Image (spheres, helix red, strand yellow):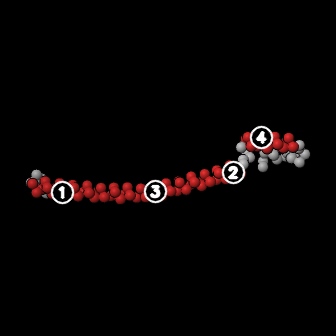
Amino acid sequence: MGVLDGVPLVGLSAPALLSIVVILLLTGRLVPRTTLLDKAKESDRWREAYEKEREARGASDSQTRELLEVSKTTHHIVQALFHNTRVARGDIDDLPKA
């Protein structure tokens, strides 16, 4: 236990042992079992929530990449349509730039 190394617990009276237990409880070195189990359950719930969030974030990122690629393709199609329309009207020549 580290804190009580070198302390002869067998030779202490009941009030002295009780005061040691109270001090350990107040300093947080000794916690009730229910508190420990509750914290373990809470930790598990947070870990599961984190893992679900990471999976959702990964799915969202992949969807964003797909949508970005689709928008780039759409942008190139619209540019080509405008270019072809201007060429058909005679606004610009269809000569490649040097």
Secondary structure category for the residue under label 4: helix
Q: Residue at x 69, y 51 (%)?
A: 34
Q: Which mark is residue 24?
A: none
Q: Crowding at label 4, few (<14), some or many (≥20) Cα neighbours within 10 Å?
A: few
User: Can see residue 89?
Assistant: yes
Pointer 3 residue: 56
Pointer 4 residue: 23
Q: Residue at x 17, y 55 (%)?
A: 83
Q: Crowding at label 1, few (<14), some or many (≥20) Cα neighbours within 10 Å?
A: few
CA separation, marks 2 and 3?
33 Å
Q: Is residue 75 left or right of residue 33?
A: left
In which quadrant is the C terminus drawn?
bottom left
Q: Nearer the viewer, mark 2 or mark 1?
A: 2
CA separation, marks 3 and 1?
37 Å
Question: Residue 62, percent across and down?
Answer: 40, 58
Secondary structure category for the residue under label 3: helix
Q: Nearer the viewer, mark 1 or mark 4?
A: 4
Q: Earlier in the sequence, mark 2 or mark 3?
A: 2
Residue type, numbered disc 3:
Ala
Question: Residue 85, percent across and down?
Answer: 14, 55
Question: Residue 54, percent across and down?
Answer: 49, 55
Tell how many labels: 4
